[in-house]
Image: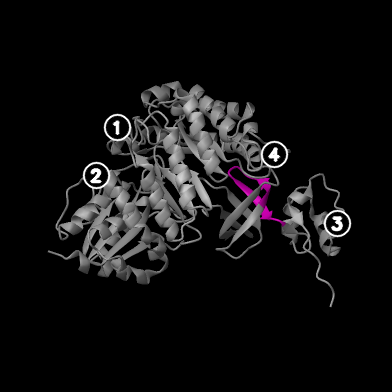
Amino acid sequence: MTDPETLSVTIVDGYVDEPAHFGVPPYISTYPRYAAGALVDAGVPRDQITYHTIDRLRDEPDYWRDVDEADLVVYLGGMTVPGKYVGGTPAEPDEVRKLAWTANGTSLMGGPVKFGVGDENAGATETERQDLDFDFVAKGDVEAAVFDLVESGLEGFNNRMRDIDEVSRWAQEGAFIVEQHPNHPEHLICELETSRGCAYRCSFCTEPLYGNPEFRPPPTVVGEVDTLSDYGVKHFRIGRQADILAYGGDGEAPNPAALRQLYSGIREVAPDLETLHLDNMNPITIVEWPEQSREGIRIIAEHNTPGDTAAFGLESADPVVQEENNLNVTAEECFEAVRIVNEEAGWRPGEDPADAPTFGDDAPRRLPKLLPGINLLHGLKGEREETYERNREFLQRVYDEGYMLRRINIRQVMAFDGTDMSDTGAEIANEHKQLFKQYKKQIREEIDNPMLKRVAPPGTVLPDIHLEYHQDGKTFGRQLGTYPLLVGIPGERELGQTTDIAVVDHGYRSVTGVPYPLDLNAASMNELTAIPGIGDSTAGDIVVNRPYGSIADADLGTEFDLSQFVTTQPLEPAD
């Protein structure tokens, strides 16, 4: 029997994206942390556990020797919702097979990959269960499989689900693994699990396959944050749950007391955290229990950081699609939930929460504390041409009645075994692909762009933009958080750095910004012309007549308040 103390283990993170779980960088999902904790709990020494992302293996091939030489290789991955990613590229099936072929030791695969594998990580696709040539595939919880496999001397395991005591213990014992992530410590956000499973049974969703909701008590989540903080983590997202408002209750009704214990506890053990965001919030909860939900939303907005997003799974505003797919919220109910979140959390730092929702010239130039995000899914059973128009009308109504959405997520369905959509597959999505493209373009132009101007008007300050890549003479970056805005900054700046920016222009789902505050005495022509009201001629005059002792000295005569964007650094005295 293999002694756990002699084992060398390599964990490879191929990234995950589930309806209630995110793990593509800069996020790190719970899976590698829990797996590492299970290994330690089973007796494997920490210094014999190696963690790599799939991107690190791509970029630095020498690390493949850790896969080759390990006694046990654990692969974690699986995408059950389609997406496009900036911070990392999820593993493709051929890469996962290469891991299995390279491993000379025992190989184990787990995570949402157990639900199925497609030809690519995209919408309008069908999946099938595959072992991808691994010795073992965890059909239950991969962290439980890791623990049992080590305890058995690498002989095997039962496909079981872990319990609350185990996951709470493993979450803290495996926190050390974050130090091996390439983004650690500054550009890493940890996904936190409060529960999993769902009380509802939408046709397409894999979350109900985990069963009914099961909650981790607040002290266990707070303890995990405390430990992660000790390892240098400052960014957290409470994203691993189907409905944050239902946390600590019966799976459906809100429990504000549990939310306060959770959020206040996190703030107490991590007072210097820089990001505290969430993901899923079920609009039907808000409609069914409005007063408890309002209290819960106020608690979240009191403790979170600005720019937070509560993803609403409307999926379709068409009643035919809603009925055929067992969707739990109507368009009217979702609109009411949008209104309530706007009223309780659509305020910006520096103003009275009672004034929410706020936007326009008098609003503080920071993102609102918490806004809804709308998920729309196409290719569902019963979808027709009218479906697209009903969705568009819903979004237009939200805008016309003066509310805000942080983002609109429009996707096509992925079909997985075990869900009701498995019979229909991607047939409807493929039939409607051209209609889908036209409709998506219309939403981006007619809704997304004006909505973004409302949420983040010119002059809005976005702190701590992490600079990620160059394109077309610009530098692009994002804040850490839930669905952060992509920001384009004129010029090519050093990557890997952070900077504060002020918004100057808007795309459909991204903004242009200039460093904040921008020094008139040092700004480039590209930066100056990006500011509203300053064209090439004015920018040229600014450069020629520098330096300035104050903004007033420049006498620019623009209609915008330039103090929102620029300053003048004190002039150095002559020698």
Mark 1 vs mark 2: which is more N-terminal? 2
* Residue 512 painted magenta: yes
Label 2 sits on residue? 161
Mark 2 vs mark 3: which is more N-terminal? 2
Residue 403 marker: none
Name which residue type carries label 1: Asp
Q: Secondary structure at mark 4?
A: loop
Q: Residues within 10 Å of mark 2 (few under 14, many from 20)?
A: some
Label 3 sits on residue? 554
Q: Is residue 324 above or below residue 119?
A: above
Taking depth in this image into account, of 185 and 158 the one nearest to the observer is 185
Taking depth in this image into account, of 132 and 198 the one nearest to the observer is 198
In three-dimensional space, the C-alpha distance between marks 1 and 2, rounded to whole angstroms, equals 27 Å
Q: Secondary structure at mark 3?
A: helix
Q: Which residues are magenta?
A: 502-517
Residue 250 on image: x %, y %? 35, 30
Q: Residue at x 40, y 69 (%)?
A: 60
Taking depth in this image into account, of 94 and 459 the one nearest to the observer is 459
Label 1 sits on residue? 423
| Residue 408 in view (yes/no) | no
Q: Residues within 10 Å of mark 4 (few under 14, many from 20)?
A: some
Horizontal arrangement in the rendering, residue 17 relative to residue 116 (left or right): right
Q: Residue at x 49, y 25 (%)?
A: 290
In three-dimensional space, the C-alpha distance between marks 4 and 1, rounded to whole angstroms, equals 50 Å
Residue 363 marker: 4
Report the mark closest to the observer, 2 or 3: 2
Residue 270 on image: x %, y %? 48, 53
Mark 1 vs mark 3: which is more N-terminal? 1
Q: Is residue 255 above or below residue 7?
A: above
Q: Is residue 62 above or below residue 88?
A: below
Report the mark closest to the observer, 3 or 4: 4
Name which residue type carries label 3: Ala
